[in-house]
Image (tube, grey):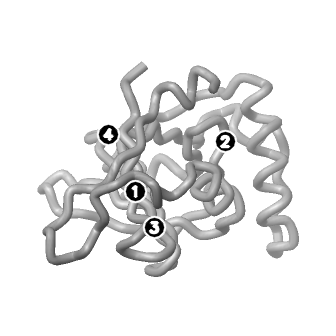
Amino acid sequence: MNAKSDSRKASRPLMPKDYGVPQGEDTLLPWETVEEQLQKERIFWVCTVRPDGRPHTVPLWGAWFNERFYFDGSPETRHVRNLMANPAVSVHLESGEEVVIIEGTGRAVGKPPRELALGLYEIYRGKYAGWPGYEPTPEMWDEGGLYEIVPQRVLAWRNFPSDATRWVFESE
């Protein structure tokens, strides 16, 4: 196990008994399954909190890298302004059957370290190259516009309710 895997603990999510979520841990979803889904997904739904407390949800491109979720955007967008005022955020995939929900805290990255910029560049190039007018570079976030979500809790399942799993991440 590495330090990152030591920081998350898997268990069953708290749900009404009538949902039929098993009590044992023998059918917990493997974390590797969640990471594979996060790495291949192209569109993520990001939900931030408006100044009046209402949710704001938007579909975005994004990347899962080193147990963090990253997306980019203009500081003028509603979701970025929300995130800068209130860092509470959730992210989920498009699927309602292969579910991954990330709950966490977001922040602006600023100019990313070179290793992060190169890693995200490779992910973005692999997922989104070919979109008209989109030419990613490792330097594209040097002036800002990159945001990081640090997970606090992740919920996931593929075969609900038998493999419904919750991971809680310890704060660093």
Q: Which is nearer the N-term, disc 2 or disc 3?
A: 2
Q: Residues within 10 Å of mark 3 (few under 14, many from 20)?
A: many
Q: Amino acid at mark 1?
A: Thr
Q: Which is nearer the N-term, disc 1 or disc 3?
A: 3
Q: Which quarter of the picture shows residue 2?
A: top right
Secondary structure under the numbered disc 1 in the rendered image: strand
Q: Position of residue 95 (x, y in %)?
A: 50, 78
Q: Horizontally, is 60 left or right of 134 in the view?
A: left
Which residue has dot 3 on it? 157
Q: Amino acid at mark 4?
A: Pro
Which residue has dot 2 on it? 65
Q: Which is nearer the N-term, disc 4 or disc 3?
A: 4
Q: Position of residue 56 (x, y in %)?
A: 30, 65
Which residue has dot 1 on it? 165
Q: Amino acid at mark 3?
A: Trp
Q: Which quarter of the picture shows residue 88?
A: top left
